[in-house]
Image (cartoon, helix red, strand yellow):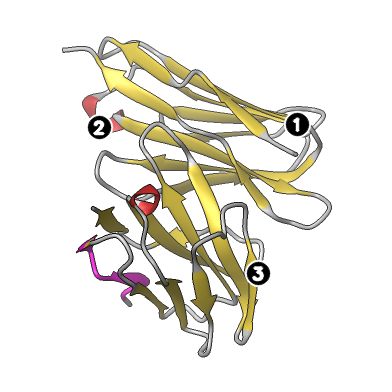
Amino acid sequence: GQQVMQIPQYQHVQEGEDFTTYCNSSTTLSNIQWYKQRPGGHPVFLIQLVKSGEVKKQKRLTFQFGEAKKNSSLHITATQTTDVGTYFCAGRRESNYQLIWGAGTKLIIKP
Amino acid sequence: NAGVTQTPKFRVLKTGQSMTLLCAQDMNHEYMYWYRQDPGMGLRLIHYSVGEGTTAKGEVPDGYNVSRLKKQNFLLGLESAAPSQTSVYFCASSLTTSPLHFGNGTRLTVT
């Protein structure tokens, strides 16, 4: 069935290093949403991308939606301890508007 | 404005027991969802509803039933709990295809 593959599953970084997570869909998406889940918490909406090639920034976070609307990425510059958590992408199908979730990328700050 | 409220927060059941999880939202959202989240996995959709009186199966509906008698409430029932249903359950709501608002989750253990 239709999937959204998200990689990597985990990323260990030193505080101050950058972090990137990628999502790839087997089919074209109408939009893609990104969520953050802190340890022990619930997913919280970060941003939605709709247009082909769209790039949006939120402070140190940069979100991109691919030209073909099949892939997306989230890049965090100079990670901080407050960035710790799991980042999920969720793509909305063009055919029936159902939301397909990636498995998430866990950001871990090395002690 | 409470958003999405889930009760209970924690529950321990014995195999074969039944229970109902309650989700309430005060945002007048049309769509409501029940997800389960297991360690190392993303969110898997159990059932969802696109309006009062309507429900539909998600990707993992077996062993669960739902009801949406009122627009603001979405109930998830387990008729005969099994250890495989040990998980964290999240309810969410949205205005049709807009981003999801999640509740704080219910941690269920079935022994």
Q: How many marks?
A: 3
Q: Any magenta on residue B83?
A: no
Viewer-nearest of discs 2 and 3: 3
> The residue marked by circle 1 belongs to what chain?
A
Up/down of A82 relative to B110, above or below: above
Most extreme residue toward the left is: A111
According to the picture, the residue beneath numbered tag 1 turns out to be A70
> Could you tell whether B86 is left or right of A56 in the image?
left
Asked if labels 3 and 1 share a chain, the reply is no
Residue B7 within the magenta-colored segment of the rendering: yes
Residue bearing mark 3 = B56
Q: Secondary structure beneath disc 2?
A: helix
Residue A87 image position (x, y, % from top left):
44, 34
Q: Classify mark 2: residues with Cα within 10 Å, few (<14), some (14-19) or many (20+).
A: few
Q: Residue at x 33, y 77 (%)?
A: B1
Q: Chain of mark 3?
A: B
Q: Residues within 10 Å of mark 1 (few under 14, many from 20)?
A: many
Q: Is residue A77 visible?
A: no
Q: Are marks 1 and 2 on the same chain?
A: yes
Q: Is residue B109 above or below residue A86?
A: below
Which contiguous range is marked in magenta?
B2-12
Tag 1 secondary structure: loop
Where residue A82 is drawn, which disc sits there? 2
